[in-house]
Image: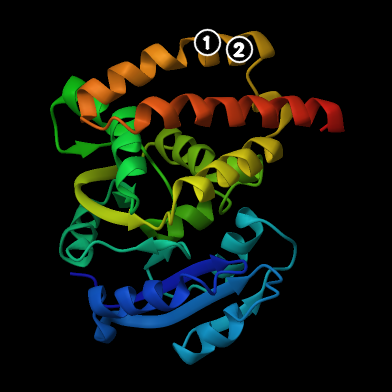
């Protein structure tokens, strides 16, 4: 039984979604188990800090920029044996608290989480197809340890994360993947429980295209694929889109999926032009 936990969050210009996110946290996680609510803000220019303070979060400044820096600053203030991280655009599943912390009863589990799917119905079907359906069918189990790991709806064993050096700064866009590898290679387990589905707020297809473009622009060179592979993926995207439409019964994805791949190619080429 977990008696007390600290909550951590890292933010940047999150005012649009934060009120909903905070309200859901208050609904899902019992107030009696919360020790501190720690928010590290990455130099927001909107009302993020004011909103956080209104919901009784302790606000600290990110000493640098990016998720790893914010996460490590939050970790520095954690006092409890376990802590929970929630990102600024995640609505926790209503059953998150009753199911996820139970995994920590196993002393070999360092991290446990649910999965998250987009709130937009079309994007939800695409993510289901690309991240979950094949893995779940292949393994035929409810608890996963190698798909869809993230750091947006997790509970951690504090001493293990600190012993591993905190959240890795090797690549800011893949903090979750690097941390997963560190946890697993140290002999501990990272549980992804696919029964517990939180919501990843995604307001629309245009927002997702803009997000994907910005994400690809920021990727480190050593993590990029090459131009040939990008073109190959794009050329086969109509066929893949047909398969997605058939599997997920969503005709709109026949148009969106190739467009999504085209936007990623444009971002890749723009990176080259900018010399990034």
Does residue 245 appear left or right of residue 231 in this picture? left
**Please, which colouring scheme is shown?**
rainbow
Residue 245 versus residue 182 in the image, above or below: above
The residue sitting at 23% across, 80% down in the picture is 30
Does residue 203 appear left or right of residue 119 in this picture? right
Q: Is residue 46 visible?
A: yes
Measured in 3D between alpha carbons, the distance from the residue under mark 2 to the one under mark 1, in whole angstroms, is 6 Å
Location of residue 254 (image quadrant): top left
The residue sitting at 32% across, 17% down in the picture is 242
Residues packed near mark 1 inside 10 Å, few (<14), some (14 to 19) or many (20 plus)? some
Q: Is residue 190 visible?
A: no
State the SS at label 1: helix
Residue 41 position in % (x across, y down): 63, 72
The residue sitting at 62% across, 66% down in the picture is 12
In the picture of the structure, the residue carrying the numbered disc 2 is 231
* Mark 2 in CB contact with mark 1 (< 8 angstroms): yes
Check residue 235 in the rendering and tell me which mark sits there, or answer none: 1
Foreground residue, 109 or 70?
A: 70
Quadrant position of the C terminus in the picture: top right
Residue 60 versus residue 56 in the image, above or below: above
Does residue 131 appear left or right of residue 167 in this picture? left
Location of residue 140 (image quadrant): top left
The residue sitting at 68% across, 13% down in the picture is 227
Residue 46 position in % (x across, y down): 65, 77
Location of residue 42 (image quadrant): bottom right
State the SS at label 2: helix
Check residue 85 in the rendering and tell me which mark sits there, or answer none: none
Residue 7 position in % (x across, y down): 41, 72
């Amino acid at each position: 039984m977990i008696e007390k936990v600290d909550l951590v969050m890292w933010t940047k210009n999150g005012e649009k979604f934060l009120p909903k996110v905070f309200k859901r946290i208050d609904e899902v996680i019992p107030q009696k188990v919360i020790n501190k609510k720690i928010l590290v803000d990455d130099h927001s220019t909107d009302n993020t800090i004011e909103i956080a303070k209104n919901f009784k979060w302790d606000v600290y400044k990110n000493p640098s920029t990016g998720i790893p820096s914010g996460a490590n600053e939050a970790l520095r203030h954690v006092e409890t044996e376990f802590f929970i991280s929630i990102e600024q655009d995640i609505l926790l599943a209503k059953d998150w608290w009753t199911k996820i912390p139970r995994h920590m009863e196993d002393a070999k589990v360092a991290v446990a989480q649910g999965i998250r799917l987009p709130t937009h119905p079309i994007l939800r079907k695409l993510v289901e197809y690309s991240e979950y359906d094949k893995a779940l069918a292949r393994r035929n189990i409810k608890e996963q340890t190698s798909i869809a790991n993230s750091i947006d709806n997790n509970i951690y064993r504090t001493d293990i994360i600190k012993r591993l050096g905190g959240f890795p700064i090797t690549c800011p866009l893949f903090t979750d993947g690097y941390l997963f590898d560190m946890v697993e290679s140290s002999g501990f387990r990272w549980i992804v429980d696919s029964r517990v589905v939180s919501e990843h707020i995604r307001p629309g297809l245009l927002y997702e295209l803009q997000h994907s473009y910005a994400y690809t622009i920021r990727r480190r060179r050593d993590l990029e694929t090459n131009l040939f592979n990008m073109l190959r993926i794009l050329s086969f995207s109509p066929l893949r889109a047909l398969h997605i439409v058939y599997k997920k019964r969503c005709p709109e994805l026949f148009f969106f999926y190739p467009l999504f791949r085209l936007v990623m190619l444009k971002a890749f080429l723009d990176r080259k032009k900018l010399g990034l």
